[in-house]
Amino acid sequence: MQHAEGLTPPVSSTSSRAGHRTASWVMLILLWVLIPALVLAFWLVRFEWTYRDKIYPGVQIMGVDLSGMTREEARLALEQAVMAYLPPPVALRYGDQFWPLDSKALGVRVEVDESLNRAFALGRNGSMLENLNAQWRAFWRGAVLEPTIKVNPGKVDQTVREMTASLNRSVTESRVTLSELQVVITSSQPGQVVDVSSTTEAIIRRVENEMGGIVDVQVKTIPAAGTIPLASKRAIEDALSQPILLTDPRGEFQFSLDPATL
C-alpha cells in the first residue's frame, strides 16, 4: 500500500500557469471592451446634458447655424434672418403670358416659432435609437431645415383675380344678319372663366413647400347654348329669293318687289 502511494505523481504547476494566462486574457479583453463602452457612455451622457435645452449641432435654417443655441438665442437669430430672406420666385402662366408674383402681394411670411420648434424637435421626438441616429447625422453631415412658410389666402385670391381678369370671356351666341340680302350666320364661341380657387390653391402649395416655379392658370370653359342649323339659313335664303308682295290694308293697291330690284 505504501508502495502504491509512492507511485502517485506530484501535481504539475503547468495547468495552473495556463489558467492564470487565460484569466489574464479574459480580463484584458473585458477591459478593452468596457473602457471604450464606459467612455462612450460618459460622452453620451455629457453630450445630452450639455444640449438638454439647446439645439443639437449641425442644424441650420435659412443659412443660420443654430448649433448649441438656446430657444431665445435661436429666435433672435431667425428673426434677423427673416428680414433678408427671399422665398423662391413664383409666376403665373397662361399660354405665352406670364405674371410674376410678389411675395408681399401674396402675404408671404416666415413662421419663426414653428421653424424654431422643428429645429428643437430634431433628435428628440423619436425612440432612443432614432434620436441618437438623427443627432449623429446632424453632427456629422449637417441638417438643413426649410423654414415654415405661410401665405394669406385672401391676398392670393385677390392677386389672382386682378392679374387674370383679362382671361375671362363671355359666351358668344350664334346670330343671323343680312348683308346686301346675303344671310350671314355668326358662329357661336364658348366663353371661359378663371378657376380662381384651383389656381390659388396651387400657388399656396408651391409657396408653402418652398418649391417656387410656374403655376398654370386654371380656367373653366362655358359652352354656348347652341348653333343655328344650316337648314335655317337655307330657309331664310329661299324666302328672300321670292318676290315680296306689298299691299295696302284695303287691298286696293299692291305691287311686288323682286330681289334684283331690292
Image (cartoon, rainbow, N blue to C red):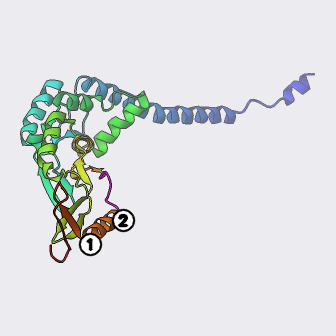
Q: Residue furthest front?
A: 252
Q: Amino acid at mark 1?
A: Ser
Magenta span dominant secondary structure: loop
Kindly state the secondary structure of the residue where label 1 is placed. Answer: helix
Return the mark for residue 231. Answer: 2
Q: How far is mark 2 from mark 1, CA to CA?
A: 15 Å
Residue 68 in view (yes/no): yes
Q: Is residue 230 magenta?
A: yes
- Residue of label 1: 241
Depth check: give the residue in front, 9 or 258. Answer: 258
Q: What crowding class fits label 2: few (fewer than 14 Cα within 10 Å), some (14-19), or many (20 or more)?
A: few
Q: Is residue 121 magenta?
A: no
User: If the image is split into quadrants, where does the C terminus sit?
Assistant: bottom left
Kindly state the secondary structure of the residue where label 2 is placed. Answer: helix
**Lower sequence index among marks 2 and 1:** 2
Depth check: give the residue in front, 193 or 260. Answer: 260
Depth check: give the residue in front, 132 or 8. Answer: 132
User: If the image is split into quadrants, where does the N terminus sit?
Assistant: top right
Return the mark for residue 152. Answer: none
Q: For residue 249, which quarter of the picture? A: bottom left
Is residue 28 placed above or below 219 in the rendered structure?
A: above
Q: Residue at x 41, y 28 (%)?
A: 128
Q: What crowding class fits label 1: few (fewer than 14 Cα within 10 Å), some (14-19), or many (20 or more)?
A: few
Labels 2 and 1 touching (C-beta < 8 A): no
Query: In the image, which residues are magenta?
Result: 223-231
The residue mark sitting in front, 2 or 1, is 1
> Is residue 130 found left or right of 50 in the rendered image?
right
